Amino acid sequence: MADKQKVSEYYTRPPTLGKWESFRQFLWNSETGQFLGRTGASWAKILLFYLIFYSVLAGFFAAMLAVFYQTLDARKPKWQLSSSLIGDNPGLGFRPMPPESNVESTLIWYKSSDKGNVQYWQNQLKLFLTKYNKDNKLQTVEPCTPFQNATAPGKVCDVSMTKSWHPCLEETGFGFEDPKGGPCIFLKLNKIYNWVPEYYNSSNMPNDNTMSEHLKQDIINAEAANEHRLVWVTCEGENPADKENIGTLRYIPYRGFMSQYFPFQNQDGYLSPLVAVHFEEPKRGVLINIECKAWAKNIHHDRADKRGSVHFELMID
Ligand SMILES: *[C@@H]1O[C@H](CO)[C@@H](O)[C@H](O)[C@H]1NC(C)=O
Ligand SMILES: *[C@@H]1O[C@H](CO)[C@@H](O)[C@H](O)[C@H]1NC(C)=O
């Protein structure tokens, strides 16, 4: 002990070491028993410290996550309808969509006599309709009568494409190969949890000219037959020339999305209802601008915001 104290009284210049030597000493200093600059006990302490520190941190994080998950339900969104980000005004979408390479494009352009050319569009539709054409439907899917009220909780109404969808079927190429007629474009209302349409009837139609007289008459007629409980769909040419070129349209299976499919509550097997718009005799060789709208009292049309309506162009060579 005395010896050691004596030694430390003097300043002894450490032996000059080469780079390699000093590195080796850093790795393992046999004099002090230090490994990487720390003794075994020091390493043990620091490891213990970090072990406890991170365990506490992980525990805290897990506890917070558990509290957070307590407030969520896997089947329904926490924020619904107007309090949610997507809001309570559904958008309208169309299929088939143009190739992804051009995200901005809404142009459906094909040559009906060119098999390879129409194939892209037909494949897109086939893919989209796969879910609809499945043979083994889930137990929750039941046949419903048109315009019936909402189903029992957890049940959904079947959206089957029967022969009556002709010519908007795969067998007939969805109309794309028809040398005279035009294609079928499928429309779909975006799903919004718990959203129920406020159906138009003769007493709540808009007074201004936002709704065509033609549609108003259709609503009145449908109400008389007690068949007005649907989200109506209309498609028309945007400009006077387009209105002329678009020709007659047929809506399959019905003029809109019927009441039995609402509300969507994330039921197993739920499929959005579809309306296939068959362009029966569109003019060829010109570009036709088309706007389709969905009509219910609680759907507001905002083209910039892509709410309640959808725009696309059709060109058939
Ligand atoms: C659905 O319910 C409404 C009232 O809630 C009723 O007026 C209507 O007739 C019902 N429709 C059917 C098809 O049962
Ligand atoms: C029409 O719809 C409104 C709700 O938008 C409802 O209050 C009214 O009773 C309905 N009128 C008829 C005749 O069904």
Image (spheres, helix red, strand yellow):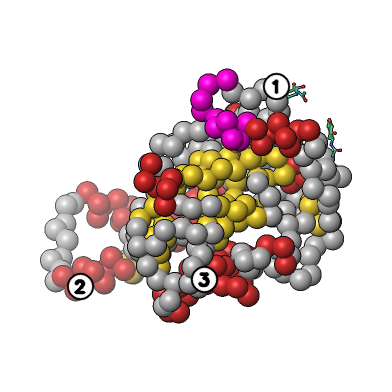
Classify residue 255 as left or right of residue 50.
right
> Which residue is denoted by mark 1 in the rendering?
203
Residue 185 position (above or below residue 117) = above
Question: In the drawing, what numbered circle is on residue 274?
Answer: none
In the rendered image, which quarter is residue 22 located in? bottom left
Which numbered disc flags the more N-terminal residue, 3 or 1? 3
**Residues in magenta, as a range:** 207-216
Q: Is residue 212 magenta?
A: yes
Mark 2 CB within 8 Å of ligand 2: no
Q: Position of residue 309 (x, y in %)?
A: 50, 41
What is the three-letter code of the residue carrying label 2? Glu
The residue singled out by tag 2 in the image is 21
Residue 129, percent across and down? Answer: 62, 65
Binning the other alpha carbons within 10 Å of mark 3 as few (below 14), some (14 to 19) or many (20 upward) gives some
| Point 80% across, 37% down: residue | 225
Dot 3 corresponds to which residue? 178
Where is residue 79, by image quadrant? top right
Dot 2 falls on a residue whose secondary structure is helix
Q: Are marks 2 and 1 in contact (CB under 8 Å)?
A: no
Which kind of residue does numbered mark 3 sit on?
Asp
Q: CA distance from mark 2 to mark 1?
A: 96 Å
The three-letter amino acid code for the residue at tag 1 is Ser
Query: What is the distance, in whole Å, between disc 3 and disc 2 at their CAs?
Result: 86 Å
Relative horizontal placement of residue 203, taking residue 146 as reference (left or right):
left
Choose between 119 and 178: the one closer to the eye: 178
Ligand 2 lies under 8 Å from the Cβ of mark 1: yes
Determine the quadrant in which ligand 1 lies.
Answer: top right
User: Residue shown at 58%/40% (left/top)?
Assistant: 294
